[in-house]
Amino acid sequence: MPAAVPPTAVKVGAFGSQTGWTTGPAGVVTADGLDRAELSARVFGDPNDLLRLNAVVHPSLGDAVARAAGEGTASGNRRVVIEAAVLFEIGADGLCDEVWFVDCPPEERIRRLRAGRGLR
């Protein structure tokens, strides 16, 4: 079974005060962790917040994907599949011998993302 990068690969601590994300009732970080619904509302509504989010998430995600791919090949797998919407943005394309792209309308992408992650 291939390794998977869990949604928790990016630690809540990455959203600390140095990133500008607030904590508490008006923020994206709560006592229980990351408020994904609040975060999605912000980044889907403000391109600048999306850029800020990417600056926090992409480095950790790239590292996690590289580790998972390395674990896959180290365990004897001849092929490792990386399914990543941001493959190029996180630099994971350098791990690939081939890149396949599957397209669908933007509305369908957003619907699938929101449904799969319980977002508004």
Image (cartoon, grey):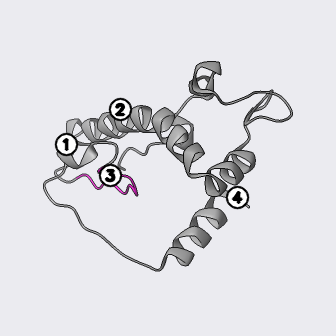
Identify the element where label 1 is drawn: loop
- Mark with earlier residue (1, 4): 1
Residue at which label 3 appears: 87
Residue 68 picture location, percent across and down: 34, 39
Quadrant of res 112: bottom right
Could you classify mark 3 by the number of other residues whose Cα lies within 10 Å: few (under 14), some (14-19), or many (20 or more)? some
Query: Mark 4 — residue?
Result: 119
First along the sequence among labels 3 and 1: 1
Seen in the image, is 28 located left or right of residue 102? right
The magenta region covers 80-88
Q: Residue at x 32, y 33 (%)?
A: 67
Mark nearer the N terminus (2 vs 3): 2
Can you tell which mark lies on residue 76? 1
Crowding near the residue tagged with mark 1, few <14, some 14–19, many ≥20 C-alpha atoms within 10 Å: few
Label 4 environment density (alpha carbons within 10 Å; few <14, some 14–19, many ≥20): some
Residue bearing mark 2: 63
Foreground mark, 1 or 4, reads: 4
Identify the residue at image location x=20%, y=54%.
Answer: 79
Q: Amino acid at mark 3?
A: Leu
Choose top left, top right, bottom left or bottom right for residue 33: top right
Which mark is first along the chain, 3 or 4? 3
- Which image quadrant is residue 100 in? bottom left
- Report the Cα–Cα distance between label 1 and label 4: 37 Å
Residue situated furthest bottom in the rendering: 105
* Residue 19 position (above or below residue 65): above
Q: Is residue 85 above or below residue 39?
A: below
Dot 2 surroundings within 10 Å: few (below 14), some, or many (20 or more)? some
